Amino acid sequence: MPAFLAPLLHLVFLAPLLVLTLASPFNPPAATPLQTPVQSLSPAPVQVEVFAAGLGTVTDFTFAPDGRLFFTDSNRKAIGVLDGEGALLERIRIPGLSGRDSQVLGLALDPDFVDNGTLYVHYLESDGWTNRVVRFHHLNGQTSNAATLLDLPLPEDPANPGQPCTDHNGGHITIGPDGSLFVPMGDNCRQNLAQDLTVAQGKVLRISRATGAGLPGNPFYDKDSPNDSRIWAWGVRNPFGSTIDPETGALWLSENGPGCGDEINLVEKGGNYAWPVSSPSYTECVDPGPSYMAPAWWWDVTIAPTGLIAYDGYAIPAWQDSLLTCDWNTGYLRVLRLDAARTGILSEGVIDLAPGACKLDLEAGPDGALYVNDMTTIYRLRAHTLCLPLIFHAGGD
């Protein structure tokens, strides 16, 4: 297993790579659907082709308005750039990233990227062990104006006194409809921090793209309060994927539990997502009660959900009006059908993309196709026909 992977997802990125514990049944609120483990799969009802290979360890990628694809290259501590045909154009060094064991976790482009060339990168710096979000400009091959928006030293690992815990660092960052920057942060092995409103660990942060400060409208935006004004939502353990629904502006989040509790959450202002109240033991999940937010979807087996999008591409019509997420454990694509209000999930379809895989991220491209990646390769998915046969697993009440 590459050294890069160990801190990403505590459940999954432990050696050996695919040795996982089946989750105990979760006793959810009555309105939460019950998932059924998939017993067999059919080949993907799409054309799967290699778009670009040999890219390093790619944890996140996104498209610029001009069709270029920007991706994290954690091996080289850089951002790679591909053209519309998958050819490498350049690699951009990430300012301030120096540690040999550092890991690049997330990437976002500014809404005015075409004009200002501004990128936002979330990474774990191993020189001093700090979670950091940086902003910098890259225009005409030149990088400038680097600034640190978020700098969170890792807390001590409770299992190794005097040592930082490098697990549960969060992952992808997302720009909201109002231009704010959403940063999901894990609990760094200190589960009690997720319910502590004075710290950023175990939270979804909403910060200014200009300064990194908390924003007016945040639920704890009060200069006289000890609570962290950057907090938007709390009670999360190890979030990785985040996305904005382009139709509603809602924020969705993929969350990784311990031996249970892999979830998709609709993130609401001030919402408490119940970690660690919902898991009194490593393999036990319980209904934490009405004071906490119930997941929109959860799994009763450990899948380790990673990248997440609300698919709005036109090349695969059958997957529109759905959230799509990657399954690290198997490489399957999970298709989660949204309800009419786009606030709940009705059913799940599971797609085997072999010989491709959906491991860490996925995006709709400017051509409408879906792009997914395993560790080093990005694949392009297009429909064979306009009608895709999908078997959905219906949720129950």
Image (spheres, rainbow, N blue to C red):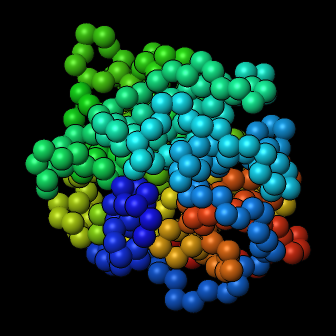
Where is 367 relative to 11, above or below? above
Judging depth in this view, the residue of 373 and 92 nearest the camera is 92
> Residue 204, can we see it?
no
Q: Tell me where residue 174 appears, x and y as whole percent.
A: 57, 38
View extreme (top): residue: 224
Judging depth in this view, the residue of 57 and 259 nearest the camera is 57
> Residue 229, can we see it?
yes
Where is 274 relative to 122, above or below? below
Quarter location, residue 359: bottom right
Where is 384 relative to 257, above or below? below
View extreme (left): residue: 161
User: On the rendered image, what quadrant is the N terminus found in?
Assistant: bottom left
Q: Tell me where residue 89 appears, x and y as whole percent.
A: 78, 45
* Residue for point 45% across, 38% down: 98
Say left or right for 98 vs 382.
left
* Residue for point 26% across, 31% down: 199
Say left or right for 344 vs 202.
right
Say left or right for 361 vs 125.
right
* Residue for point 77% across, 78% down: 45
* Residue for point 26% across, 23% down: 227
Q: Tell me where residue 54 appears, x and y as whole percent.
A: 67, 63
Say left or right for 154 vs 354.
left
